[in-house]
Image (cartoon, coloured by chain):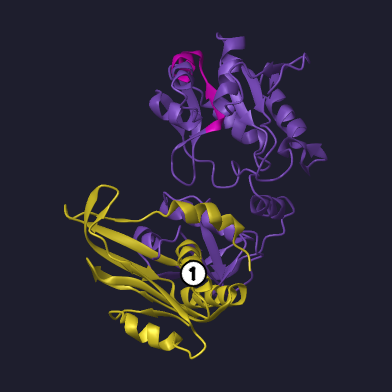
Amino acid sequence: MKGLLLIGGKSSRMGSDKSELILRDGLTQKQRGTALLKSVCDEVFISTCEDTGEPNTIADAFGPIGPLGAIASAQKADPDSAWLILACDLPLLEKDQLEILIGSRSSSHDATYFSSASDGLPEPLCAIWEPTSIKAVQSAIDKSKQCPRSVLIQLNGHALPSPGLWPLANTNTEADLIEIRARLNSSTTVKNITVSYFAQLRELTRTNSESLQTDTVTPAGLFEEIRAKYQLPLKRKGMMVAVNGDFTDWSHPLSDDEEVVFIPPVAGG
Amino acid sequence: MFQLTDQPIDPRTLCDAVRDPAAGGFASFEGWVRNHHQGRDVTALEYEAFPALAEKEGQRILSEIITKHDIIAARCVHRTGYLKIGEIAVCIAVSAAHRDAAFDACRAIIDTIKSTVPIWKKEHYTDGSAGWVKCHSCSEKAPDHHH
């Protein structure tokens, strides 16, 4: 099996290239991802936007259309191999999880993947894409439907149970990064937090308010826990958060006994 | 200046509240419950607020707009609960020495309230179904929310 590391473009949300971030072992995310893949794959390639001419890189053959284009480019480079696709921004992912993925691989399926902790849907960027997935990948690109997760949903995939919330947590935002760093430094403590729910969140959770214990350090992390608990079909993007009765940032440092309200898109007037 | 209420809104009360001898212009806006949305027949609306923060944020918006525009007074009342077609969901009243400031401030108040005040709207349709309304412009503004 071959491995492909996705290093993304410039991250618009982080304002810097997340593949160059150093979060653990003194390695950049790119270096750490490469090492992880090398520990379980025969050959490892890095996905790049442009053809750099460097060895072990695969340039996007379908333009800047994101991860599905990178997957298709790898499949074009070697259509007979299965590809272990891995995003570089999963700092809490361990070799163990990749071994589980490979150990559970089923070549009678088009793909083997973990289910997401938050919504049970396929996790496409830590997954094995078999040669039999090529047709669906191509057809999605032809239709300009470039969501790799949607492609996996349509395929005959082998879904593994979620490895939990954190192994597949990515570093998309500043708050994600704070949450992940706290976990890497083992600087998380258990806090009692009251969460109140309004509108669709109140209906989805079937509760007005609850007290819970969490070791998350930001409202962002807490929301991910709650999303997983209730399998909420809502993402943080577009939502706001209030702590102790006023708006705050998703990266606010949570303290014991704080009151948190997650605010889905508002619609007054 | 900003209030939530679960009772029918009387616009005259708001108008009287901004009345001032120095005011030469008055502008108001009323948001009414409409019987259709995006091609679907609506029978009623239900508004829900996070009261403490809605009032705090509403108050903050009015104060900011009074500072920014040359106006004398501004009031806003937003309804919560179950509303029938034609009822007033929100009412804004602004008085100013001159009309431009009154119009501008009134417009700015409703636009800002719709995008940041934690109030949600559930539509009930003729087929018996219901759904929370998504406001797309506010989700774009949300990440920029800082005070």
Q: Nearer the viewer, residue A50 or B136?
A: B136
Side (left or right) of A118 relative to B47: right
Q: Which residue is mark 1?
A: B109
Relative image position of residue A240 (x, y in whole percent):
53, 60
- Establish if A103 lies above or below A216: above
Q: Nearer the viewer, residue A218 or A269?
A: A269
How many numbered marks appear?
Answer: 1
Relative image position of residue B130 (x, y in whole percent):
25, 56
Choose top left, top right, bottom left or bottom right for residue B83.
bottom left
Relative image position of residue A70 (x, y in whole percent):
60, 22
Side (left or right) of A215 relative to A116: right
Q: Amino acid at mark 1?
A: Ile
Choose top left, top right, bottom left or bottom right for residue B44.
bottom left
- Establish if B93 lies above or below A54: below
Task: Return the residue found at the far right.
Answer: A26
Q: Residues within 10 Å of mark 1 (few under 14, many from 20)?
A: many
Side (left or right) of A39 relative to A63: right
The purple-tinted chain is A
Subunit under mark 1: B
Residue B136 showing in the rendered view: yes
Give the drawing colour for chain B. yellow
Residue drawn at (42%, 50%) of the image: A231
Q: Nearer the viewer, residue A247 or A83?
A: A247
Task: Return the residue found at the far left.
Answer: B127
Residue A211 showing in the rendered view: no
Residue drawn at (63%, 35%) of the image: A96
Residues in magenta, as a range: A124-137
Relative image position of residue B17 (x, y in whole percent):
42, 88
Tag 1 secondary structure: helix
Is residue B15 found inside the magenta-colored segment of the image?
no
- Establish if A85 lies above or below B106: above
